[in-house]
Image (cartoon, grey):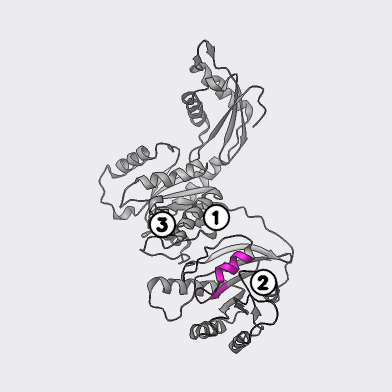
Amino acid sequence: MSKPIVAIVGRPNVGKSTLFNKLAGERISIVEDIPGVTRDRIYYETEWNGRGLILIDTGGIEPTADDMILKYMRLQAEIAIDTADVIIFMCDVRAGVTADDRDIARMLLKSRKPVVVAVNKIDSIGEPPPEFYEFYEFGFECDPIALSSVHGTGSGDLLDAVLSYCPEDDGETVEDDSIKVAVIGKPNAGKSSIINKILGENRLIVSEIAGTTRDAIDTHLENEYGKYTFIDTAGIRRQSKVEDRIEKFSVLRAKMAVERADVCLIMIDADKGITEQDEKIAGIAHEAGKASIIVVNKWDLIEKDNNTTKTFTDDIRLHLSYMPYAPIIFVSAMTGQRVVKLFEQINYVHNQACTRISTGMLNDVLNDATTRVQPPSDKGRRLKVYYMTQISIKPPTFVIFCNDIELFHFSYQRYIENQIREVFGFNGTPIKIIIRQRGDTEV
């Protein structure tokens, strides 16, 4: 039986993200005392009393808002409501029952989903204040729950009420064997758009306003190519331009998304060309040892001749010279051009990153390489390379034992890496080589 989905909805700034983080046990959603910080739906798996739950945090609902972003936030909250098995409707006891609360309550009643009203910001212990009882007027089946999302008081009663609407768990757990794909890039490079095109639905907010996506969001997809979890991230700006605290959180969260990904799609805006910031963003994936694909988006906007693709490819290879292993694909999230080919590339580079080579085969390559190009020497001492073995994958990591680490120049290490790639491929993934001196058992 799948885990029940619980959506947390309500007006802006009533404490939804604070509750979400408290229930998750870690800081997943960005929390700031600014309405509208959480814009998309944020998912997290947790458990209560041995029962698994999938929590969804949502942007604040403003039923009558005219602003474009606020309309998107309302739409995303409505999608979360449609997706959820149970809804937590958060209200603020200090504000009392507002007109927007009543509008949201009517929306929830129409959904015919089980609703638990969480009356937040009741920070004192004991009987709730008289204002708490105003929230009975909504007429939901379940009694409102007094809550302090900051201190966590009442959260147990809230989850007990939520689980009372959920069918019994059959105890089976399903291991997540999907490929985790982080979509990274500068603001407005088309990260959310490419995921929307892949999914065929408006799963993420898409806007021409740079920096729309602030949290990293997981989206699960299964199709004929396999199982995937796409992680959409906030656009990474230049560090000097990351001025407010929310943007700083977003850059950190994008880096965290790369860390938990198997494959990174590095989005390049074809209309803007490759920039210094693109180099830095790609460097995050490279330094993290992630299999990567360079995705040049908005290719439909470029006027082309016979040399356009080659010229753009050469420019990328020049600027991203540290990752020549990464394949390049030219796409259009707007028209869907070549988007479906991304699945084949994702599968390919992921398989390359998971490849293991036997020690015997590695040492055949090593012996051939050292025979063709003699190891370097210094002051009468020559480097002796004894053997090589692979110790891990994602990225493929090799340990080479020698007589003296100081003699193993970087250029010779690069030569050995090139020989490994020439024989075994490892296209789309960085590889890591660790040099150890004989007698050094630390790996």
Mark toward the viewer: 3 or 1: 3
Q: Which residues are magenta?
A: 8-22
Q: Which residue is mark 1?
A: 228
Mark nearer the viewer, 3 or 2:
3
Q: CA distance from mark 1 to mark 2?
A: 32 Å
- Who is closer to the viewer here, 157 or 197? 157
Quarter holding the C terminus is top right
- Percent across and percent down for residue 171 are 74, 63
The residue labelled by disc 3 is 243
Q: Residue at x 28, y 44 (%)?
A: 308
What residue type is disc 2 on?
A: Ser
How many angstroms separate mark 3 from mark 1 (CA)?
Answer: 34 Å
Q: Amino acid at mark 3?
A: Glu
On the rendered structure, is 328 left or right of 166? Answer: left
Q: Is residue 86 above or below residue 178?
A: below
Label 2 sits on a secondary structure element that is helix
Say left or right for 378 vs 165: left
Q: Quadrant of residue 14?
A: bottom right
Residue 47 at what x, y percent from top left? 68, 64
Q: Position of residue 98 (x, y in %)?
A: 51, 85
Residue 64 x %, y %? 42, 81
Disc count in the image? 3
Which element type, helix, strand or loop, lies under badge 3?
A: loop
Few, some or many C-alpha atoms within 10 Å of disc 1 (few <14, some 14-19, many ≥20)? many
Is residue 369 a member of the stretch shown in magenta? no
Q: Residue at left 64%, top 66%? A: 23
> Can residue 88 be seen from the camera position used here?
yes
**Mark 2 — residue?**
155
Q: Indicate which disc, 3 or 2, sits on the residue closer to the N terminus.
A: 2
